[in-house]
Amino acid sequence: PLNGPIVNFGFSLKRIFSWFLFEFNLILYALTRKKSERPDVVIASSLSLLTFVSAFLLKRMFGCKLIVEVRDIWPATVIEIGKVKEKSLFAVFLKKVELFGYKKADGIVATMPRFDLYLSENFNISKKVICIPQGYDETWVSDSDVIQVPFDKNYFNVCHSGTVGKANNVEHLLKAASLIENENIKIYILGDGPLKEDLIRKYDKLSNVVFLKAIPKNDVIRFISNADLLVNMWGDYKMYRFGISPYKWVDYMLAGVPILVSYNGYRSIINEANCGFFIEANNPKLLADKIVEISKMNREILKEIGENGKTYATINFNYTSLGKQFLNFINEC
């Protein structure tokens, strides 16, 4: 591995510096490789976009294929959420690097199901594109250890798992909790993040909300599998019309629990697996009403919905299956 500085949550100058440092170290590393160690293919996985340039240099250096993997659409995403101004030199530079990477790639792998639409709308280039969603390692679903969970079986237990930050819209769930405080429902926030302490102070009087510390990745799926409903909130951004494939959905589906997603983008995976519900984003009242509605559903039906997700994810999202798709795509490019 090429080690770099430890970077905290969020977008920062330190993170940008780490990009440049990584690319510099990568080129130095490549220059020291023997002929027998030269690759057949170079895979440039965003983020950072600067890897597109380094990967192209490696492609020319080794005479091999270049596959660009897009996990986040940059800089469009950070421009839309307001972290970078569209006409800033930094954004203009990243746009040029992005276009360069797409043009020089022999093929593009994206986690977004409609990335081909993004290419057609924004760039006049024709490339082989495939959507390969996020996957999972089988160690994540191991049943070797017993996990203690705080869920109260006298309640309908709703859980959100993940970073408590701006992008996760956890406050929408807390606002929803304030509207259903008299229902037989408890809401659990599992994870840490930059907004957690502020939200604890702001909503400390809610009797139906429990904040939990983050737990090891390998324990998450078994932990949340004890909930009755898993929730995931997204902001209302145009970029989502190309679809998303978050790790959170993979974890949630493998847990075998129904999923409620507030989201205005292109709907996929959850509806395809028939394992949950989509509702409009940025609407705590609707979120509250839907949680109450689901809590009153037949438990056997909810169990079946949850199992749908587990079956779908087990078949389609394991790394062995996704790896074969990736390899076949590389061979076709």
Image (spheres, rainbow, N blue to C red):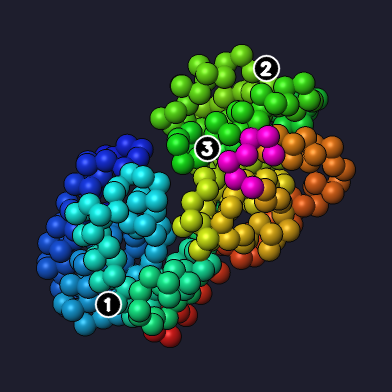
* Quadrant including the C terminus: bottom left
282 is within the stretch colored magenta: yes
Q: Of residues 142 and 260, which is closer to you in this image?
A: 260
Disc number for residue 169:
3
Q: Residues within 10 Å of mark 1 (few under 14, many from 20)?
A: some
Q: Residue furthest front?
A: 87
* Quadrant including the N terminus: bottom left
Residue mark closest to the camera, 2 vs 3 = 3
Mark 2, residue position: 207
Q: Residue furthest top?
A: 205
Residue 182 in which image quadrant: top right
Which residues fall within the magenta stretch?
Answer: 280-286
Identified at 50% across, 40% down, the residue is 168
Q: Is residue 9 visible to the viewer in this orientation of the structure?
A: yes
In the displayed structure, 264 sits above or below 320; it is: above
Q: Secondary structure at mark 2?
A: loop
Q: Residues within 10 Å of mark 3 (few under 14, many from 20)?
A: some
Amino acid type at circle 2 is Ser
Coordinates of residue 231 in the picture (x, y in percent): 64, 41
Q: Secondary structure at mark 3?
A: loop
Seen in the image, is 277 located left or right of residue 195? right
Which of the two discs, 1 and 3, labels the residue nearer the N terminus? 1
111 is within the stretch colored magenta: no
